[in-house]
Image (tube, coloured by chain):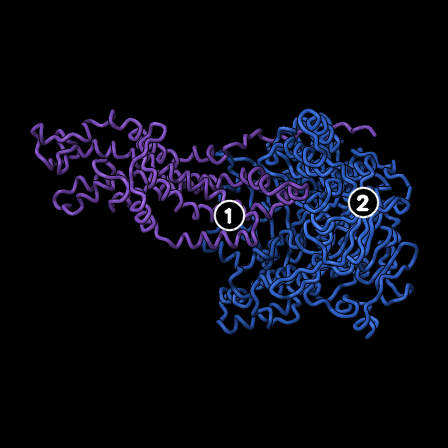
Amino acid sequence: MTSDNGGSPALEVTDLAIDYRVRRLWRPVVRDVSFEIPAGGSFGLVGESGCGKSTVAMAVVRYLAANGRVSNGSVKVAGTDAYSLNARALRDLRAREIGFVYQNPATALNPSMRIGAQLAEVFSLLGHAKDEAMDRARMALGQVRIADPGSVLRRYPHQLSGGMAQRVVIAMALANDPSLLILDEPTTGLDATVEAEVLDLVSALRQDHGAAVLFISHNLGVIRKMCDDVAVLYAGRMAETGRTEEVFAEPNHPYTMGLLRCIPRAGATKARGKLDTIPGFLPDRPSGATGCVFADRCGLATDVCHTEPPPPIAVAPGRISWCHHHDQTAALPRVEGTDTPLVPAAASHDKPVLLTLKNTSKTFTQDGAEIRALRDVNLHIHAGETLGLVGESGSGKTTLAKAIIGMHAPDVGSTVTLMTEPLGPVAHKRTGDQIRSIQIVFQNPDSALNPKFAVKRIIGRALTKLEGKRGRAAHGRTVELTRGVQLADHYLDAKPLQLSGGLKQRVAIARAFAGPPRLVVCDEPTSALDVSVQAAILNLLVELQERTDVAYLFISHDLGVVRYISDRIAVLYLGEVVEIGDAAQVFDGPHHPYTEALLSAVASVDGDERDRIRLEGEIPSATDVPGGCPFHTRCPRKIGEICETSRPELTERSARHLVRCHLPDDELGRVDGSVPVPVAISSRV
Amino acid sequence: MAVVAPSVEAPAVAATRTRFLTLRTAAKSPTFIVGMVILLFWIACALWGRAIAPKDAFADYIKTGYPRRAKPGGDFLLGTDDLGRDVLSRVIVGSKDILTIAPLATLLGTVLGTALGLVTGYYRRWVDLVVSRIIDAFLAIPLLLLALVVITARGSQNTRILGVELNLTVTIVIGVAFAPIIARTVRSAVLAQTDLDYVQAARLRGENGLYVMFREILPNVLGPILVEFTVRLGYAIFSVVTLSFHGVGVQDPSAVWGLSVSKYYGSFNPFWWPVVFPCLAIASLVVAVNLVADALQEAQR
């Protein structure tokens, strides 16, 4: 079904330059971006937020925001110059040749139309008769591996899970059998297990349709898995481009190198040392600078970098780098010393127990139905340790965090103890000391800080409330706290609007440490941040822990991050702990089958393809938890009837490592977890 | 352990002042400027009406030899009315009552409505349920009926407050009638805020409800409240005019516009000028207020 265009590439972007008009001035946003995707090829655009990835994608379909313009260059889709077309021809080109998949499937679908009607509409537009269009829609859903297309056709978008909705969007994008499929962060909001499924689906469909793919992601692992070629963008310019595995294995631009070093991967842990970061910030006016846009943040920069823009340099066949010093990339100095282990080797489980949860459950009632978000959770957190909490969305991670922090009361019969005292169910029933002891860092730093308050007021108020400090004493401590999170003094008068995401998160962390706390609940504290900022925040958290002996309950869907920061890890499924143990035990195995599936779903930047274990279907609803072992409906290692009838106990498999499964130890799986990689990587990268 | 020296460099943030951002953004739009110019004209008329007016608005010019119902033009630019009074001067002076009662009534409604909206939006559950039902019941009473009943019962005399003649009854009736409507808008703005983590963070460090509502949330909903105030102001002007048209509220010999319209609309043909010019005045004032409201709303986005 490959569309034949006389051998012209599916997409050819040449010297693309894009400006945005901001306050009556045209500002350069993208400059000199050129790449080519052969028919059936796959190409990735990768970079941090603000680097111009999505802008380029929008320019390809000629759909820039009203204040945007293409000021130079050309875009050819299947040989046709998109910018030479009139409105009708452009519409036709979009309809015939291009499929577009957006980041958020929830907003890409019309909430007031049934899936069937929406999908059939696409086929009607393509010229099919009405009843034929509906049949086509049904087939399209089958094609994206939706098991029961009939029922999905009758549903509304809000009745679909994120993964299911994204499949529908992909089905829609493929309806016209496009020669170019553009995917803009298609899996960013999805769980790792669902992400793996969607990526598999895209790979398979690519083979069937022969469509070329332009894949945009900030996730290097996903790009590594999906794309033949990649371009790394920084501040609207190409940093380097080439075969994906070559670029990631042996980067030729210090920015790529920096990105790769920021990622906690392949078994990196805090005990092995700090993560590297990229110093500084994205320039305020990208692409306008003379010289190299990355020069201010680059460890290799010399005078020439500040005066002369780097030309494209062919460093190897098919590889181009825009760096004066591309040959020195491997020698890029580290920002953070990596060899000194940070955390003393004393095992966290030798420390006194700080928080204990016994038979903790949480049931919500909605429209008469009971939602059992947490079921008989037993766990404890030691002073000064990090307990990582992993599981898909809907597994009860956030509910558990909210119960601990006092946002909602656990069910009657649950016992939560802090030190030796029972902990009040909700915040306003706790003593001042208990409130001070347990604080939280939220996922989204934008909403966590009152936008109308200056930094010093945000932190000062927490001090007044938690520590009873006012006036001069409060101010002195505020300065101490902001310095503690490495925030310069002049930010004290800034309001959140004037701060970047990473700086905001530092303020939020400083506020949580006002108490000072014994336990800080970190609910995905870095998932809204770019990788380089994430690395800095993780370093900060580790450092604060070392200094104050605070304990963390760390929630994240990013297993690399959890592995890096956690001493122990608990895996949650449908509101119960299915596995808990030291981080190394949980990662190295033997695993609970669910943990095994989670681990194998991760798209690794190192590209080591493992035997993937795919989970069937979605996590069941908490209103109707399956009997027996709740995981039996999706378990690839199900033994038989026992799994459906009897609920396994959480049993100790080795010292401190507990697994809730009927399988004996030697039959539990292991995702290749021997993890010898980090040393190799740090020597190579 | 030693405190680590700050290592995070300053990002190049434009040092934008975030205070009164809505107002400052709006001030740049032509809509706002046009609306504001008209509005300021009427405010000037309200403040210094008798000085600005070319003639004495309350004098009977028949006595001085002019005809009654003089046509527009000549000595009387907009003509004279039945009693030989100068229409232009009366239109100018007539702005005063409206421009005292309407803003004060709106302010009263906004203060009451904001308090109600904060409480219902923040506490939700049964507080919200009870107060919201009362608000709904209140909204079901037509403004005109309410005003008729209250004014008949209480009488409608002008009171002197801080040196300003003011019909207090009309002001309070309109203010109270507006409060529930404003409360609804504020409530929805507050609801959006309570979902944000900074409100959770405040609760989790043990702040009480009053602090969270008035110190944390209120500054963040001032924008929508400002917009609501200007929108309501337009309606308040209508309400004052309507009430005086119906003969409740401000009474003769006041030059208030509604009164003039109500008195002369029966003899519109051919005696149109004492009706049309006050109507144009009303329209221009309401349009001006709405232009300002629109500009503010736009600036919010």
Q: Residues within 10 Å of mark 2 (few under 14, many from 20)?
A: many
Where residue A95 sits in the image (x, y, percent)?
Answer: 52, 59
| Residue A473 in sight from this viewpoint | yes
Q: Nearer the viewer, residue A650 or A417?
A: A417
Q: Is residue A260 left or right of residue A68?
A: right
| Residue A661: quadrant of the picture | bottom right
Q: Is residue B192 left or right of residue A394?
A: left
Where residue A127 sits in the image (x, y, percent)?
Answer: 49, 67
Q: Is residue B149 left or right of residue A584?
A: left
| Residue placed furthest toward the bottom | A641
Q: In the picture shown, does residue B25 fall above or below A143?
A: above
Q: Which chain is blue?
A: A
Where residue A426 sits in the image (x, y, percent)?
Answer: 69, 49
Quadrant location of the C terminus of chain A in the rendered image: top right
Residue A565 image label? 2
> Disc 1 marks which amino acid?
Arg
Chain ID at mark 1: B
Chain ID at mark 2: A
Q: Which chain is purple?
A: B
Tell me which residue sits at (86%, 48%) in the image: A677
Q: Residues within 10 Å of mark 1 (few under 14, many from 20)?
A: many
Which marked residue is nearer to the observer: mark 1 or mark 2?
1
Residue B187 image label? 1
